Image: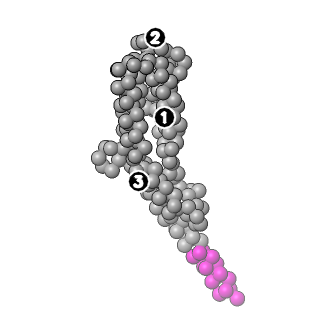
Amino acid sequence: MSFFKETKAAIIVMLAVILGSSTISAVGSINKAVSKLNDQFYKGQGDNLCIYEDIIDKTEFASKIYLIASKNGFADKEVSKISSLIQDIKSEKSIRKLYSLMQELDSAVEHAAALLPGNTDLEKAVRDYNSESRTINSDPYNSMVKEFHDEFDGIPGSLFQLFASKAEYFR
């Protein structure tokens, strides 16, 4: 009789160890994949061509737009918002929050651009700003995040993701 009790206990312990180790392994794999995605966002594929650097470039053009509008007497609330958004963007680390801040910056820049039609310096800065937007939109990062979610969504991947790092879209 004690043989069966010891065998049951051993089986339970063995199953717990197998389940625990597979969970740790799966969460580790998910975290590694998320880390690769974050590297893609912040560092690119070893070429320093990445969304984050393009965002920083875009804020430099936004800063030029802000200065041109301010020099020409247009420093209303929306134009002034450009300066504070640039600072927030440079200090933000959450990809999702960066996206939200960039949308606000796009709106403020669009407002500033409409204030001075025909100003060639402003038009050039807006063209450069929009060029960075197109560069960011063509980056493969979001499709990589989609592939990640396609691979790890469903059972049991979605359960393991409860314990793992999160992959965020930049959209």
Can you identify the residue that label 2 sits on? 73
Task: Give, as a three-letter code, the residue at label 1.
Answer: Met
Q: Quadrant of residue 9?
A: bottom right
Can you identify the residue that label 1 sits on? 102
* Residue 134 visible, this angle: yes
Query: What residue occupies the far right of the structure in this picture?
Result: 1
Dot 2 and dot 1 residues touching (CB under 8 Å): no
Query: What residue occupies the far left of the structure in this picture?
Result: 47
The answer to which of marks 2 and 3 sits earlier in the sequence is: 3
Determine whether, in the image, residue 132 is placed left or right of residue 168.
left
- Of helix, strand and loop, which one carries label 3? helix
User: What span is in magenta?
Assistant: 1-15
Compared to 31, does 139 lie above or below?
Answer: above
4 in magenta? yes
157 in magenta? no
Dot 2 and dot 3 residues touching (CB under 8 Å): no
* Residue 66 visible, this angle: no
